Image (cartoon, rainbow, N blue to C red):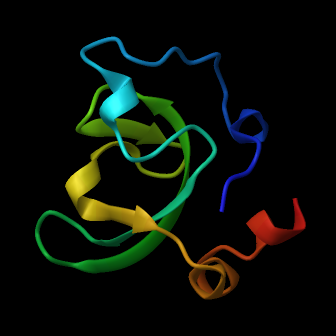
Amino acid sequence: MRIDERKYAKFEYNDGHSGDHTKNPFQRGDVVIKHKTSQGDVVNEIGVVLQVHDEFELRTDMFGNEGISTLTMATDEEIKKFRPKLLVD
């Protein structure tokens, strides 16, 4: 799912400051889920991609900068369960 990320940004973000952001599988506005922290704790946080730094890292509205290895695209069911307001906005 992709939404208008500007609704969730506090600033105007620019992509690609540290590398080739076009090789990142995620784009601005993608709704992603982080199932676990780097310590292995289950969090199931849903975030909207605000900025793509390079091919490995991005920024979301809910959990800041994050490596893409910990993220997947959120399904409609996950969004309904963990952050349903995104479906209404």
Labels in figure, total: 0
> Which residue is rendered at x = 79% and y = 39% of the image?
7
Q: Is residue 16 left or right of residue 1?
A: left
On the image, the x and y values in percent for residue 40 come to 14, 76
- Give the answer, above or below, for where 47 lies relative to 53: below
Q: Is residue 17 left or right of residue 2?
A: left
Q: Is residue 28 left or right of residue 54?
A: right
On the image, the x and y values in percent for residue 78 come to 57, 83
> Which residue is rendered at x = 34% and y = 11% of the image?
17
On the image, the x and y values in percent for residue 82 come to 59, 80
Q: Quadrant of residue 18?
A: top left
Q: Is residue 85 left or right of residue 52?
A: right
Q: Quadrant of residue 20?
A: top left
Query: Dividing the image into 4 quarters, which one contains the N terminus?
Result: bottom right
Q: Quadrant of residue 38?
A: bottom left
- Report the residue that reaches farthest toward the left: 39
> Which residue is rendered at x = 52% and y = 14% of the image?
14
